[in-house]
Image (cartoon, coloured by chain):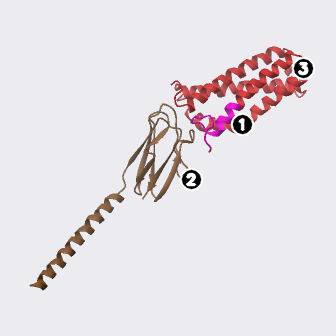
Chain colours: A brown, B red
Amino acid sequence: MRRSVSVAVFIAVAVLGIAALGVKNSAVAAQQKPQNAEVKIDNFSFGPAALTVSAGSTVTWINHDDIPHTVASADDPKVFKSKVLDTDEKFSFTFTKAGTYAYFCSIHPKMTGKVVVQ
Amino acid sequence: MSDSFLGTQAPLAADVVLLLEIAMGAGLLAGARLARKKRYRQHGWCQSIIVLLNLAVIGLTMAPSFRLHVLPRIPAKLSKPYFALATAHAALGSIAELAALYILLAAGTSVLPERMRITRYKLWMRTVLALWWLVLVLGLATYARWYVPNSPR
């Protein structure tokens, strides 16, 4: 009787453990699925200033400000660089490699942001 | 790229150019006063240094910035005030600088053939000085429109 209780407890723990692992794995899989993200440019700032996405995701910057801005990677050589974006114009870039990508507006260098790719 | 020391959204280079251009505009007025006092030699040196310094500033900072940020969007975006202001500043500024260089060559050297030299110096110089100041005002407006968040839209 005592032995069968122990076996039952062991099986229950094992089942729960496997289930938990499955949930965790599916969460990680969902997290790593590429998704599209948007960064708004307004009032001389990027919003959100810091963005985390998974590899393969495309980030689109939209200039809602009433003056021109650019989006330029701070890396040398530049990983991405937009043309001058007029009001309501967009720029998109797909991040294929993991890493932290700092960027700024080359017209207004105080405007900075970063994209963290996992 | 360093930040503005004038407290705007401009890069450091734009602030330096702004102050330099204001100083050069004032310097040209001071140089014109030297001519009125008949100190022609000092007048010639003063105006020549400013015109040549401005040529360097145009070549090193303003022209590259214009080529990068404005030129690709004109004429399509000329209806937008920020592109229109910058373009007017660049166009009139080029004319003013070229005219000033012409006066330097005509009045300060003998490299130009006789028929290309000017005789009505005062008219030429006063016209270019007035144009220079118009360009300076357009430059101030361009700076405000591009870099000052609360400037009139």
Magenta segment: does it hold B7?
yes
Can residue B74 be seen from the camera position used here?
no
**Chain of the residue that carries numbered disc 1 in the rendered image:** B
Give the vertical position of B20 relative to B126 (above or below).
below
Which amino acid type is shown beneath numbered disc 2? Answer: Asp
Mark 1 / mark 3, whichever is N-terminal: 3
- Res B133 → quadrant: top right
Quadrant holding the N terminus of chain B = top right
> For the magenta stretch, what is the residue range?
B2-19
Residue at 80%, 27% (x, y): give it. Answer: B101
Res B39 label: 3
Residue at 79%, 32% (x, y): give it. Answer: B52
- From mark 3 to mark 2, how far is it between C-alphas? 54 Å
Query: Where is residue A89 drawn, in percent x and y?
Result: 45, 37
Can residue B26 be seen from the camera position used here?
yes
**Chain of the residue that carries numbered disc 2 in the rendered image:** A
Which amino acid type is shown beneath numbered disc 3? Answer: Arg
- Classify mark 2: residues with Cα within 10 Å, few (<14), some (14-19) or many (20+): few
Which residue is nearer to you in this view: B7 or B63?
Answer: B7
Which residue is nearer to you in this view: B75 or B38?
Answer: B38
Res B59 label: 1
- From mark 1 to mark 2, how far is it between C-alphas? 26 Å
Q: Secondary structure at mark 3?
A: loop
Res A75 label: 2
